[in-house]
Structure formats: C-alpha cells, structure tokens
Image: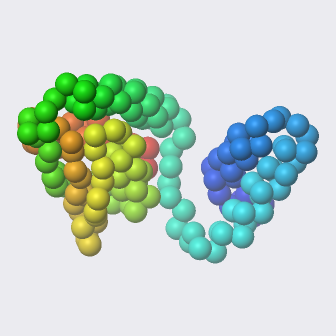
Amino acid sequence: MRKLLPHPGLSALLLVIWLLMANTLSVGALVLGAVFAVVLPRFTAPFWPDRPKVRFGRDLLVYTAIVLFDIVVANFQVAAVILFRRNRDLRARWLVIPLELDTPEAITVLAGTISLTPGTVSSDVSADGRFLLVHALDVPDPEAEIARIKQRYEARLQRVFA
C-alpha cells in the first residue's frame, strides 16, 4: 500500500481540494481527482525521503478548531483596532519567539498559522531554526503574547508532529 500511496495524507488532501475546486461531486471529477491524488504523490515521493510524522486525530482536530476560532476572533479585533484606534496609539511590536519545534514542517505550520491570524505575520526563521520573527499589529505585553503563541499553538503542534 505504501508503494501505491507514499503519502496518504497528501493524497487525501489533493482529492478533497480537487473536488472543492471542481465544485461538483460527479464521477468524472472524482475519478480525475483520484488520479491526481495517486500520481502526484508518487511523482514527488523521491523529493520527500523523510516524511513528516503527523498524528491525524484528536490533537489535529483540536488544533484546527482553535486556529479557526482565533482567525474569526482576530478579524473582529483587527477591525476594532482599525476603526476605533488612532495610529499613534497602536503598539506594533516585533516578537522573537524561541522555538521548541524541530522539524521544518512543524515550523512551517506554526509560521503559517501565525500569518493566517489577522494582526500578526511571520517574517523570518533564524538560520538554525530556533527562533521565529513575528510582527504583531497591537501588542500591549510582548512577553505575554509570546507565551500565548507558544502555549496555544506550539505546544499543540508538538503533539501533532510527534
């Protein structure tokens, strides 16, 4: 089975994304999506010698729910900042977040999560992969924000990418 589907998670994701892009659940779309879901991971398998170890389960579902919730809440927070605050009252900060994550895939997911949440953007990872540079739009306490990111996202990602 591993030879047919070298990256089953990627295959499933490709099939779902294809069906969403096709915007139909016809036999043709399903067959073409299945072909892509089988062929593309087999073609790219030599470029992924060390597959990331991802635990699909409760931890990943909880993480996804938290990120989606945080995105919605942050949209309202950023809207309030834009509508009701003067520019000189903003407390924009650069945050240097020490990382305990050790795989490039986990660090990429963390950086992407931070960038997806309105009001923050990941801008750089240190050369040794131990620090993440993040810009935040309005942060009254930088240390508390770093602790929140580490506790809310990084700790959960450590369980997902174990």
Q: Position of residue 13 (x, y in %)?
A: 65, 47
Residue 81 lies in quadrant: top left
Q: Position of residue 52 (x, y in %)?
A: 50, 58
Relative height, residue 119 to residue 5 (above, below): above
- Residue 130 appears anywhere in the view: yes
Coloring scheme used: rainbow
The residue positioned farthest toward the right in the image shown: 27
Q: In front here: 26 or 149?
A: 26
- Residue 155 appears anywhere in the view: no
Relative height, residue 99 to residue 85 (above, below): below
Residue 6 lies in quadrant: bottom right
Residue at the spot 57% in from the left edge and 69% down from the top edge:
48
Query: In the image, 114: left or right of 126?
Result: right
Query: In the image, 144: left or right of 161?
Result: left
Q: In front here: 153 or 53?
A: 153
Query: In the image, 9: left or right of 38?
Result: left
Q: Position of residue 135 (x, y in %)?
A: 22, 50
Residue at the spot 84% in from the left edge and 43% down from the top edge:
30
Relative height, residue 126 to residue 114 (above, below): below
Relative height, residue 47 to residue 136 (above, below): below
* Quadrant containing the N terminus in the rendered view: bottom right
